[in-house]
């Protein structure tokens, strides 16, 4: 699969922000359909991992991405608008004649660039167990927190991270965009820092690659397309048990404030969890 790089330059906060990104999605080695969907439309970068029998998951993820893509096209991206768009996606899913499975829904995770204030920030958002990572100052951090049974067991101390990797309930999520679910994501706000590299991915990647593996391919590949290709190939070689979707987004900033720490507590969210 050929992966290409897209770029965008933005004047922000008294300086210039150069963004470059690449994305890929693949059905994996064991699934007949790809129920993942991906959106890379500045200022919004999103991965959705659908679930549900027949075509339900594909319909759910596509509905979420289509509604969010309309925000990017209009240039009106905010936490409130994201929640409205996801609410519309739920109505789309309910109205679709082929989305008949009770378990139909989708994860949604991503980041958008908020330039409404004097100093720009990134805002990550998440429903489900797809993830956002950031590589900053040679440290890979998982920004989002999974909405899953396993994560709740880890957080309560009843399961170690090592035990969680192969837990039989590893696929059971506790929040999704679907007919009976809340559409309010968790949010985390981050400063815009030169040299940051974001990875946005479905769990088809994190089932096959550890955080160390993700970091390896970022370190080995300065080009975002090459990093995506390397991670995708490794996830397929390791079994490709699920659909796999990956975005790598690189940030280069000149001028402006540019703080050095990940900021927490934005838009009602918590700070990023270490990996």
Image (spheres, rainbow, N blue to C red):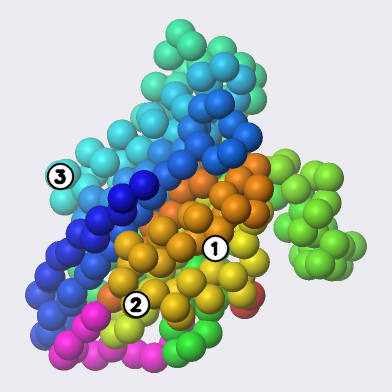
Decide if residue 235 is in sight here.
Answer: yes
Pinpoint residue 93: horizontal percent, then vertical percent. 45, 22
For mark 1, does the 10 Å Cα neighbourhood hold few (<14), some (14 to 19), or many (20 or more) residues? many
Tag count in the figure?
3
Name the residue beneath numbered marker 1.
144
Label 1 and label 2: CA atoms lie apart by 24 Å
Decide if residue 117 is in sight here.
Answer: no
22 is higher (above) or lower (below) than 94: below
Label 1 and label 3: CA atoms lie apart by 26 Å
Q: What element carries label 2?
A: loop
Residue at (32% x, 62% y) in the render: 225
Is disc 1 in contact with disc 3, using a CB cutoff of under 8 Å?
no
30 is higher (above) or lower (below) than 249: above
Viewed as shown, does residue 8 lie left or right of 273? left
Name the residue beneath numbered marker 3.
74
Name the residue beneath numbered marker 2.
222
Q: Is mark 3 on a helix, strand or loop?
A: helix
Q: What element carries label 1?
A: loop
Q: Earlier in the sequence, mark 1 or mark 3?
A: 3
Residue at (63% x, 35% y) in the render: 30
Does the magenta segment cover residue 264?
Answer: yes
Pinpoint residue 188: horizontal percent, then vertical percent. 46, 67
In the rendered image, which quarter contains the C terminus?
Answer: bottom right
Report the magenta residues as a range: 252-265
Label 2 and label 3: CA atoms lie apart by 32 Å
């Amino acid at each position: 699969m050929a992966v290409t790089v897209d770029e965008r330059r933005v004047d922000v906060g008294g300086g210039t922000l150069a963004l470059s990104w690449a994305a890929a999605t693949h059905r994996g080695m064991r699934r007949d359909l790809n129920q993942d969907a991906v959106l890379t439309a500045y200022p919004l970068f999103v991965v959705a991992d659908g679930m549900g029998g027949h075509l339900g998951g594909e319909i759910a993820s596509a509905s979420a991405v289509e509604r969010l893509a309309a925000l990017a096209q209009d240039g009106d991206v905010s936490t409130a608008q994201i929640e409205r768009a996801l609410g519309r996606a739920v109505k789309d899913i309910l109205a679709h004649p082929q989305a008949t499975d009770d378990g139909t829904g989708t994860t949604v995770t991503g980041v958008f660039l908020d330039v409404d204030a004097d100093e720009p920030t990134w805002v990550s958002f998440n429903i489900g167990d797809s993830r956002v990572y950031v590589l900053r100052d040679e440290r890979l951090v998982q920004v989002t927190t999974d909405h899953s049974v396993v994560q709740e067991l880890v957080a309560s101390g009843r399961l170690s991270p090592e035990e969680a990797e192969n837990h039989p309930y590893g696929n059971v999520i506790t929040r999704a965009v679907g007919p009976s679910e809340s559409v309010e994501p968790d949010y985390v706000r981050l400063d815009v820092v030169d040299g940051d590299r974001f990875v946005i991915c479905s769990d088809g990647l994190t089932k096959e690659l550890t955080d160390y593996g993700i970091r390896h391919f970022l370190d080995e590949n300065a080009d975002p397309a090459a990093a995506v290709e390397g991670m995708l190939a490794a996830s397929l070689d390791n079994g490709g048990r699920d659909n796999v979707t990956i975005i790598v987004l690189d940030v280069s900033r000149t001028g402006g404030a540019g703080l050095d720490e990940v900021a927490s507590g934005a838009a009602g969210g918590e700070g990023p969890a270490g990996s």
